[in-house]
Amino acid sequence: MASIRCRPLVLSILRTAIRPATTATATTTMRHYSEKHRQHSGPEFATTVDSLKQAVRVGKDEELSNRQLFSRLKPDAKTLDTLDMLQLGTEKRGRFERRKWFRYNEPDVKLPHINFFAGALTAESFPAETLPEIGFVGRSNVGKSTLVNMLCGSSAARVSERPGLTQQINFYTADNDFHLVDMPGYGFAYAKEEQKQAWVPLIESYVRDRKRLKRVMLLLDARHGIKTNDREFMALLERTGTKYQVVMTKCDLVSRIDLAKRHLLVVQETQKARNCIPRVLMVSAKNERGLNELRKEILHTCGLGKKYLAMHKKKEVIARTEYMEQLDIFKETARPKKRRQ
Ligand SMILES: Nc1nc2c(ncn2[C@@H]2O[C@H](COP(=O)(O)OP(=O)(O)OP(=O)(O)O)[C@@H](O)[C@H]2O)c(=O)[nH]1
Ligand SMILES: [Mg+2]
């Protein structure tokens, strides 16, 4: 009985005795990596505050907080129209009620189901390059694995509410046409400093050496936009000459107006990056919104447009025309807003 009770104590003493040696080596390696990384950090990206100041007119003597600057930002009308059409972003109930009678009947783009075929913890264990690849990177918990699943209507990738679940580079094959590659997340906010970037060297060797990597989808949480470690990662992609595209995730958790403003800031920050595709996509994996646009990007990038999208363009034109007609009628019949006296 006594030995059973003592066991947890003995175990914890043993664990503390072993831990310092292992974490110390990890810390040194990561510190060494971060220093090297900082020295060659590549192009400088504007910070969110810089972009905010660029986009908002501020009087000479005005001192505004970031929140005040953000509230003064004017969202782009075109982006708002796209959000309405794709039903992205949260809205006041009344607005949805009024618009309930018409919807954009978006024709679905179907991707084949995916199957897991390889996992790599080191660069040596990457599988042979046989098909075009699309990689998914981003901060921990941004929704990479969920998005990989939702794009292909599958549950092959494991998902968790807890950040840091994906711990290796996972390769999925889609009907032997292309590969989707789900990567571990970087910059988990509650992790220790040395663990925050733990996966960056592995991902770096992947993006640098993989010849058939067609594009990296850089996922950003729509609530937060670009964070410091995203900027560092973008600099890495610029250095390695990797083509990448920004996708804003979890758009169901942000109001429509704030989403349009956040989109504007992200576009502004990324437009100068040489390897970044200018079009910033917005998705909600939870509500399955905006996924078709991303599916189309993946197919075109892998050269599979003809195979998968033969009839799609026609259907899309018809659906869009119908939507625009209904929108015109809606605008004509909408009650004018009451002016405040
Ligand atoms: N509301 C909402 N939640 C989402 C969305 N996408 C993912 N999530 C949730 O976010 C959490 C993290 O999702 P994962 O797909 O595991 O995130 P990840 O980026 O793969 O995380 P790591 O593997 O830790 O890097 C899960 O609880 C998901 O249900 C979304 O579009 N909307
Ligand atoms: Mg994951």
Image (cartoon, helix red, strand yellow):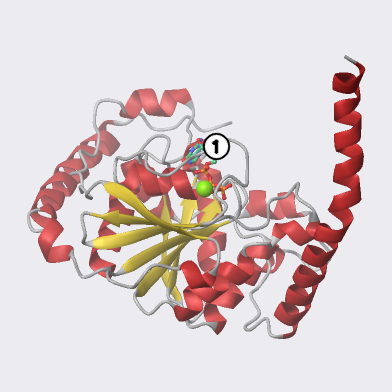
Residue type highlighted by circle 1: Ser
Disc 1: residue Cβ within 8 A of ligand 1's nearest atom: yes
Describe the element under mark 1 as helix, strand or loop. loop
Label 1 Cα crowd, 10 Å radius (few <14 / some 14-19 / many 20+): few
* Foreground of the two, 159 or 119: 119
Task: Find residue 52 and report its image quarter.
Answer: bottom right
Q: Is residue 332 above or below residue 81?
A: above
Name the residue located 63 percent from the left edge and 84 percent from the top edge. Answer: 42
> Is 93 on the left or on the right of 174, as rendered?
right
Name the residue located 45 percent from the left edge and 23 percent from the top edge. Answer: 93
> Is 179 on the left or on the right of 209, as rendered?
left
> Is any atom of residue 63 visible in this view?
no
* Foreground of the two, 279 or 309: 309
Name the residue located 54 percent from the left edge and 55 percent from the top edge. Answer: 220
User: Which residue is outermost to the top?
Assistant: 1
> Is any atom of residue 65 visible in this view?
yes
> Is 110 on the left or on the right of 314, as rendered?
right
**Residue 158: image x %, image y %?**
47, 41
* Foreground of the two, 66 or 131: 131
Name the residue located 62 percent from the left edge and 62 percent from the top edge. Answer: 199
**Residue 24: image x %, image y %?**
85, 63
The quadrant of the rendering that contains the C terminus is top right
**Residue 186: image x %, image y %?**
63, 58
**Residue 255: image x %, image y %?**
53, 38
* Foreground of the two, 113 or 117: 117
Q: Is residue 242 above or below residue 49?
A: below
Q: Which residue is mark 1?
A: 160
The quadrant of the rendering that contains the N terminus is top right
> Is 295 on the left or on the right of 30, as rendered?
left
